[in-house]
Amino acid sequence: MQKNKVLRLAITGANGFVGSNVGRILSRKGISVIGIVRKGKDNSVKFGVPVVSCNFSERYLISKLRRCKALLHLIGTGKQTVDSDFQTINVGITNKVVSLCKKAGIKKIIYLSGLGVHKKNTSSYFISKYLAEQEIIRSCLDYTIFRASYILGNNDPLSRTLFKQIKNGKIIIPGSGSYRLQPIFVDDVAEVFLQSITSKKYSKKIFDLVGPQIITYKNFVRDFAQGRGVKIKNINLEEAYRNALDNSKWIFGLDDLNILVGNYIGNHKKLKKISGIKFKTYKQILQSGRTS
């Protein structure tokens, strides 16, 4: 970064868990952050400059993003509804964001994908993420793609799900719970994102965005619930999927279950080597109270 020259970047999904935390952290480092959000969500952005967009096609976006060095593309969905499907959100919006970068002269895009994405995965969610990655790779933009495990931090989705169950007095574990996670701290994610913008070492590469510890879901839940006096109950995996099919308000959706029981782990050593960061373990994150 040059002296007296402020680094300027844009974030899509700036009011989401990752976007709000990363935007806040980077703003505190003196970076000029533009948070792109939907209409009515601009008041929820507590950092930088919020910009409203309905479809990423508005002409005024070009001038507002003109001097951005990079764009963090954090919009995505892991659940389909009649109003929101994987193709429209994960692939279609990515295509529009790539086009916007080109029009605004933004040379670099950082994309938050999912751990488990690969060409042969048959899950609709992972297929959409793979296709979104391909849109970016073929764009001729510089890029870094991060395939993320569960990201932990203030108000993260996994912790919200567990806190909701704790409030109801019982945590449900689908199946045996022996499938594994590799959680990563959102503050560490922000630092990795910043490095990917400022360092050429990340140019046109794909990384697993995973933490230093691999843990089974049942052990993660036990550590999360420790001292809270809550019951933990295993249910048959078939029953869990049946509940997901029959009840849209159940704690797990179909694709939530596919991701959770997928047993996806990644290459943390590669990320640690290139970043030089001393990543927090999931136990350090839980002990710090940073998930509440």
Image (tube, grey):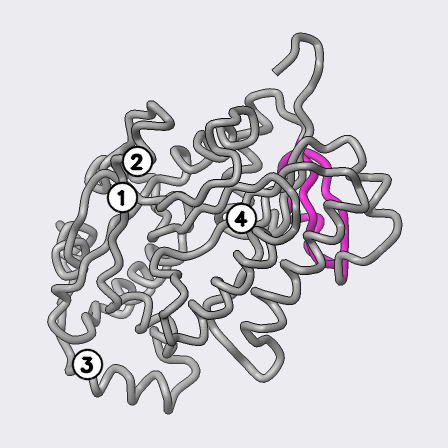
Mark sitting on residue 235: none
For residue 282, say whether it is visible.
yes
How far apart marks 3 and 2 lie (CA) works out to 33 Å
Which x, y percent locates residue 18?
A: 49, 47
Residue beneath the point at 30% across and 31% down: 272
For the residue marked with disc 2, what is the amino acid?
A: Lys
Mark 3 and mark 4 lie on one chain; the one further toward the N terminus is: 4
Residue behind mark 3 = 237
- Label 3 CA crowd tier, 10 Å (few <14, some 14–19, many 20+): some
Asked if residue 119 lies left or right of residue 210, the reply is right
Which x, y percent locates residue 8?
A: 69, 28
How far apart marks 3 and 4 lie (CA) works out to 32 Å
Asked if residue 279 lies left or right of residue 87, the reply is left
Mark 3 secondary-structure assignment? helix
Mark sitting on residue 270: 2
Mark 4 secondary-structure assignment? strand
Residue beneath the point at 59% across and 49% down: 73
Mark 2 and mark 4 lie on one chain; the one further toward the N terminus is: 4
Residue behind mark 1 = 267
Cβ–Cβ under 8 Å for marks 1 and 2? yes
Residue 124's place in the image compared with 10, above or below, is below
Cβ–Cβ under 8 Å for marks 3 and 1? no
